[in-house]
Image (cartoon, helix red, strand yellow):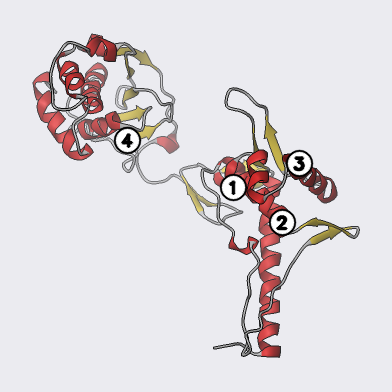
């Protein structure tokens, strides 16, 4: 059984992993001991190693402590990160199915004031107080039910598919089925990153012996009217990057009204929905590109690359290139 007497040893080990001693380390170690005891895990590094799964809700100091004490980690798929921004973790005994959520009490910091005086840094009193405060003073606990899917469990990937847009492999059934296509979550509009597109900016392809340079420009017309080109692509790319039409308009140097006019014109003439707007609220509204828009990007890129290859090759043949 893990004894409270091991607390200082576990804390020292945790500090080595985290890099310094802080209040979060004390809370993380105590939270781990409490959570494991509540679900009947007493030896997480040997006999119970395969029986423990932990969901953490905060990407701060306490999470390093929980990983150090429990031995659970993202790489082993025994730790799951839930981006809730809360000082809380749920401990699951995979053998029995019992799960307990341990959360930090909101008034613990206030209660810690004055318990211990002195210290060389601003957190010293808080650290000293947390060490001697009881579990009931620091945490709330509650039994919970956690739905565990086969694809969330430790072990080899159950499935691996290729995203039809970016062509990257997607493991553990994290793909999305949208409009009859299998895509990754990033290509489905939920990505945290956007790919920089250097072709949005005109540049010389080759120079010949007298420093002549060739440039090309490609745009799409519908019934003789320009609909889509580098300028419009740049606008949509900024919307995807920032999640905001207003911010995208500022980035490309036009007004919001003009940006929205361009979007509506493209949608009407191309016959596809390009941008989904979200209603405003406490943090304001936003905008994301549709699956159709991302697919249109891919096709336009193929055309852009193809035209540049043709122009590039023809320029070399006709004028020669500078070595």
Q: Position of residue 270 (x, y in %)?
A: 81, 51
| Residue at the spot 70% in from the left edge and 77% down from the top edge | 310
Is 250 positioned to the left or the right of 110 in the image? right
Which comes sooner in the sequence, label 4 or label 2?
4
Q: Position of residue 149 (x, y in %)?
A: 45, 32
Residue matched to label 2: 231
Element type at marker 4? loop
Identity of the residue drawn at 69% across and 43% down: 179
In the picture, the quarter occupied by the C terminus is bottom right
Disc 3 to disc 2: CB gap under 8 Å: no
Q: Looking at the image, do the residues carrying marks 2 and 1 touch, with CB atoms under 8 Å apart? A: no
Pick whichever, 270 or 175, lies toward us. 270
Q: Nearer the viewer, mark 1 or mark 4?
A: 1
Q: Is residue 184 visible?
A: no
Question: At numbered mark 1, what does the secondary structure look like: helix, strand or loop?
Answer: helix
Residue at left offset 50%, top offset 42% = 173
Q: Which residue in the structure is indicated by mark 3?
A: 260
Name the residue carrying label 4.
78
Q: Cα distance, mark 4 to mark 2?
A: 47 Å
Disc 3 from disc 1: Cα separation = 23 Å
Depth-wise, is mark 4 or mark 2 nearer the camera?
2
Secondary structure of the residue carrying tag 2 is: helix
Q: CA distance from mark 2 to mark 1?
A: 22 Å
Residue receiving disc 1: 187
Say which of 236 and 45 sits in front: 236
Q: Position of residue 249 (x, y in %)?
A: 68, 45
- The quarter of the rendered structure image containing the N terminus is top left
The reply, left or right, for residue 217 in relation to residue 250 is right
């Amino acid at each position: 059984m893990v004894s409270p007497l091991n607390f200082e040893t576990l804390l020292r080990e945790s500090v080595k992993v985290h890099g310094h001693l802080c209040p979060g380390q004390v809370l993380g170690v105590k939270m781990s001991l409490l959570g494991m005891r509540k679900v009947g895990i007493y030896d997480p590094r040997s006999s119970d190693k395969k029986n423990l799964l932990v969901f953490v809700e905060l990407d701060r100091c306490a999470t390093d402590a929980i990983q150090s004490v429990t031995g659970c980690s993202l790489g082993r798929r025994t730790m799951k990160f839930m981006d809730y921004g809360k000082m809380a973790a749920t401990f699951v005994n995979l053998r029995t199915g019992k799960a307990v959520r341990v959360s930090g009490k909101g008034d613990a910091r206030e209660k810690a004031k004055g318990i211990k005086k002195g210290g060389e840094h601003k957190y010293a009193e808080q650290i000293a107080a947390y060490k001697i405060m009881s579990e009931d003073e620091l945490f709330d606990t509650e039994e919970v039910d956690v739905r565990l899917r086969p694809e969330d469990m430790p072990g080899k990937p159950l499935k691996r598919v290729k995203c039809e847009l970016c062509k990257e492999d997607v493991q553990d059934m994290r793909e999305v089925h949208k409009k009859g296509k299998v895509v990754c979550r990033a290509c489905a509009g939920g990505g945290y990153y956007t790919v920089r597109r250097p072709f949005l900016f005109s540049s010389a392809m080759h120079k010949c012996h007298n420093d002549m340079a060739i440039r090309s420009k490609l745009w799409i017309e519908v019934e003789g009217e320009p609909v889509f080109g580098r300028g419009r692509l740049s606008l949509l790319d900024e919307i995807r990057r920032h999640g905001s039409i207003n911010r995208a308009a500022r980035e490309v140097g036009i007004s919001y009204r003009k940006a929205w006019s361009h979007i509506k014109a493209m949608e009407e003439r191309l016959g596809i929905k390009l941008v989904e707007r979200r209603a405003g609220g406490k943090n304001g509204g936003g905008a994301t590109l549709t699956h159709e828009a991302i697919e249109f990007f891919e096709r336009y890129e193929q055309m852009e690359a193809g035209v540049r290859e043709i122009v590039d090759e023809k320029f070399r043949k006709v004028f020669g290139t500078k070595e």
